[in-house]
Amino acid sequence: MKAAVPVPPYLAPGRDLRLDFFRGLALWFIFLDHIPENVVSWITVRNYGFSDATEIFVFISGYTAVIAYSRMMLKDGWMRAAARIFRRVWQLYVAHILLFVAFTAQIAYVSIARDTPQLIEEMQLMGLGQNPYRAILEAALLKFRPVNLDVLPLYIVLLAAFPFALPAVLRWPWVVIGTSIGLYAATSRFDWNLPGYPDDKVWFFNPMAWQVIFYSGAVLAVVAPRLAILDHRRWTMTALAVFYLLFAGFIALSWHYNSLERLIPDWFARQIYPIDKTNLDILRFVHFLALGWIARLLVRPNAQFLKWRVFQPIRRCGEHSLPIFCLGTFLAVTAEIIVARYEESIVSQLLVSLAGLILMSLFAYAASWSKAQAKVRA
Amino acid sequence: MRQWAFVAAFGMAALWSAGAGAEMQCRAARELLELGNPLAIAKTAVAEERELRIVAMGSSSTQGYGATNPQFSYPAQLKMRLEKAMPGIKIHVWNKGIGGQDAAEMVERMRQDVTPEHAHIVVWQVGTNSAIRRDPLTKFAEKLRTGIDIGHSLGANFVMMNLQYVPAVVALPDEEEYAQAMADVAKEKNVGLFRRFEIMRSWYNDGMPYAQFVTNDGLHLNDFGQKCIGKLLSMSILNAVNPRQLTGTANTSH
């Protein structure tokens, strides 16, 4: 009997629970990290190494983009698939604009209702004060992005370019990842970035650098079965990954303990710092790849714990990533306002973090329910 | 059962982290807050015009890169705190921070950024990018002098803010030389110097971990760092302008 040719994940039927789980987790982390000086954010991945939840979110976005649209392209042709991708881009764009309005409206509402000019000041600082009409125009062009509203514009740009890369991703994945890494390297070398507003601002997440995470996800979705080659070197790979994660963990720990920090020699620190986020420092990229490798080994697509009930809220959030991301960004501001009001106590941080996660989960359950209803009717 | 054991373990870990996250206070020794300049123009402006106009010239620290909210950037904090400390005095702070710029690039725009605002004080946050790019020290000092001369010709007091004490800067072989060059130029040109480098080093030496005041890129100040520098800079400027003494004289003269 011939061994069955493994089916690439993008053609396999059923839902890969790992994607929902890790994307949900990333959304929770992004929410927690967006609350300033939040003690609960200590549990998030950024405290234990170089990369953070953004890498997870962007990687899974690339991975799922292949899963969602490749089958459509193979069945209905490129035009149809491209049309669907642009429809999704449009949804993202609408969501981003809605979030922009809700985000600023919330700050405006609180400052008017409670007569706190500080918050109005905040809007001024965001760039809305001096020239609101211009700011709205620039927001529509994605050039003006108040703080924390940086991730969706990145996703929009990446997905808008995706239809043109999709055929190549399926046919010549290695060429695609090579090009992607080339663009990434050139971007950090020559300091390219897209223009922002006001004029001196650039994209906090530089799309030309961060695309490498997106296409790592996209290409891995295609070549996953062929990764069996790597499994022959499983122990070497794992040893390297573990070694690197320990190294990153040690550096991260040194930010918390000065006695450890003093052990790092200057010449070495000079090689690693600064660990740039805007242009996705190579240390961050490799850290994410190492995490990904370990996650691939430890969490099989059919791993039991993915189905645990306690994790269901996380998975539900991951299933509805767009509205949950928007809600999380909105609630992070609410949380910030509440925490600031209660003297920034640890209890208030714990409570708003928990309340936010519960609200996000409830919304995700409601979204699942409403989707199921729509299906029943159809 | 296993699920709940996992949740319990996770909760314990979270509590442990919360304990480790206990924060130290924002503070600095009094002598570190001495600017070494009386800021005479600012003082007069506060007393006579009931107004203080400040231009914050600088790079990413000024822009607020790394803070989760632009309100936490040190210029915004400066405005808030000065307003609170000097009620009735109109405070303006213009944020002219552009990420990534070094001394030479800021000198280029010094005139056009300071002129329209009629600044009484120019806070010039500078040095870090020049040090990272390894600009020659003599050229760096020369640029500082040129920048200060431009500001002086426009009728402003200067407060130079030196490098931040963070892993990416401390790792440089000669960061202290850059700080020293700034101190020398400050003395020579008779301008104020806000010794951010020494202040932050004192935090570190007192046992405050980097995680409390630096973002995890090892270069930029986080929310706490930005807010604390804003607070300490406000104290320094208030010490120099000394509004209490001013109101005192105002009272006796009436």
Image (cartoon, coloured by chain):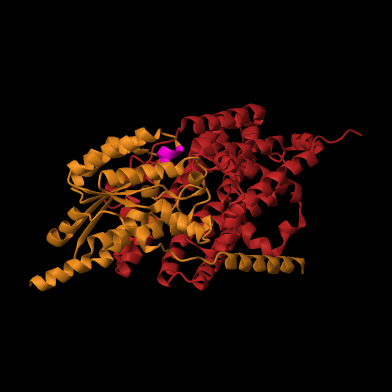
Quadrant the C terminus of chain B occupies: bottom left
Viewer-side residue, A362 vs B236: B236
Q: Residue furthest right?
A: A1
Viewer-proximal residue among B181 and B160: B181
In the image, is A365 to the left or to the right of B29? right
Q: Which residues are magenta?
A: B127-132
Residue shown at 59%/58% (left/top)?
Answer: A257
The orange-coloured chain is labelled: B
Res A200 quadrant in image = top left
Q: Residue at x 47, y 60 (%)?
A: A36
What main secondary structure does the magenta stretch of the protein show?
A: helix
Inspect this view and state whether residue A135 appears: yes
Please identify the residue farthest to the left as the structure is shown: B254
The spot of residue A154 in percent (x, y) is 49, 42
Letter of the chain shown red in the rendering:
A
Q: Residue at x 41, y 66 (%)?
A: A337
Which quadrant would the N terminus of chain B be assigned to in this image? bottom right
Residue A47 lies left or right of residue B140; in this view the side is right
Relative to B140, residue B253 above or below: below
Q: Say above or below: B251 vs A257.
A: below
Percent position of residue A132, x then y: 28, 50
Number of numbered tags placed on the structure image: 0
Q: Could you tell whether B99 is left or right of A213 in the image?
A: left
State which quadrant residue A174 falls in. Answer: top right
Magenta stretch contains residue A56: no
In this view, the residue in front, B74 or A222, is B74
Measured from the top left, where is residue B202 in percent x and y? 46, 58
